[in-house]
Amino acid sequence: MENSLYIALSRQTAIKREMAVIANNIANMNTTAYKGEKMMFVDHLVKSKGGDRLISEKLAFVRDIAQYQDFSEGAFSETHNDLDVALHGDGFFVIETEQGTRYTRNGHFQLNEEGKLITSDGNAVLSDAGQPFFFAPNESRIDISRDGTVATTNGAVGRLDIVTFENSQRLQKEPNGLYTTQGEATPMENPHVIQGSLEGSNVNPMIEMTKMIESQRAYSSIKSFIDKEDQRMRKVNELIIR
C-alpha cells in the first residue's frame, strides 16, 4: 500500500475514535457533574525519499495517544433540596461502594430507610472520619455549610470528606459519575460547598455538535480520497498487466 493511503487511513481511524468521544459527550450533556472528554493526537513525521530535491517531502502519520478529561466546572442550578450539594472549584466527594472507595462530583444525595446519607445509586457518602452519615427520624432539618460541615437540629453530625488529587487526569472514570484511582487523595483544607444546588455537565452542546459535523466532513473527505486512490491504483495495475 502506498504511503498516501497509510496516512489517510491513520487519520480516518483517529477521526472515528474522536467521533465516538464526541457522541458520548453529547449523550451526557444533561448528566449531573459530567466531565467531557477530549482526544489527544500526535503526528509522526517521516522523511520520504527526496531524490534530487534539496528538501525531501515529509509524511505525517496521525495517531491518537490518549483521552483526557476536561475537569472545568459545570454550571450550577438551584434545586432548593437540602441534600443536593455542589462543589465550587476543585474537589471530589468520597463515596464508599461494594468495590471500595470511589470519588464523585455528583452531589445529588438522599436518605435511605435507615437514615443513612447515600448517593442516587445507593452508595454511602463518607465523612472526613471515614464513616457514613446517619440521621435520626426526629432530625427534621439538615444544614451543610460552606466547608462541608453537616448539622441538624440536634447539632453537628460531621464533615463531608472532600479531597483533591495531584493529577486529576489519573482518575479513571466509572459508571454513575464515579472515579477510581491508585493515587493518593489529599483532604481539601478550604472546600466551597453550595447547599441546595447541583453542578451540571460541562459539555457545551453547540461546540460538540460543531465538532461532530467537522469530524464527519473530514471522515467523508478522507473516504472519498481513499476511493479515488484505490481506483487510480487499479487502473495502474491494469495498464501493467496489459
Image (tube, rainbow, N blue to C red):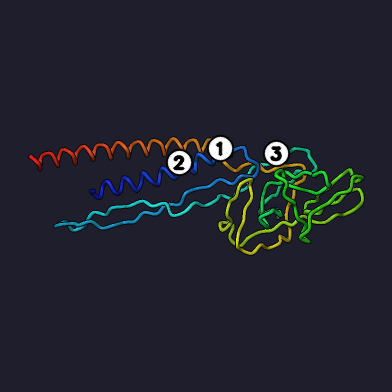
Q: What's the residue at 47%, 36% (across, down)?
A: 210
Query: Which is nearer the eye, 133 or 185?
Result: 133
Q: Closer to the N terminus: mark 3 or mark 2?
A: 2
User: Which amino acid, mark 2?
Assistant: Met
Q: Closer to the N terminus: mark 2 or mark 1?
A: 2
Q: What element carries label 3?
A: strand
User: Which amino acid, mark 3?
Assistant: Ser
Q: Closer to the N terminus: mark 1 or mark 3?
A: 1
Residue, far left = 242
Q: How far across and how far down the image is residue 242, in percent? A: 7, 39
Q: Nearer the viewer, mark 1 or mark 3?
A: 1
Query: Which is nearer the eye, 184 or 98?
Result: 98
- Which residue corresponds to mark 3? 77
- Which residue corresponds to mark 1? 27
Crowding near the residue tagged with mark 2, few <14, some 14–19, many ≥20 C-alpha atoms within 10 Å: many
User: Which amino acid, mark 1?
Assistant: Ala
Crowding near the residue tagged with mark 3, few <14, some 14–19, many ≥20 C-alpha atoms within 10 Å: few
Q: Are marks 3 and 2 in contact (CB under 8 Å)?
A: no
- Which residue corresponds to mark 2? 19
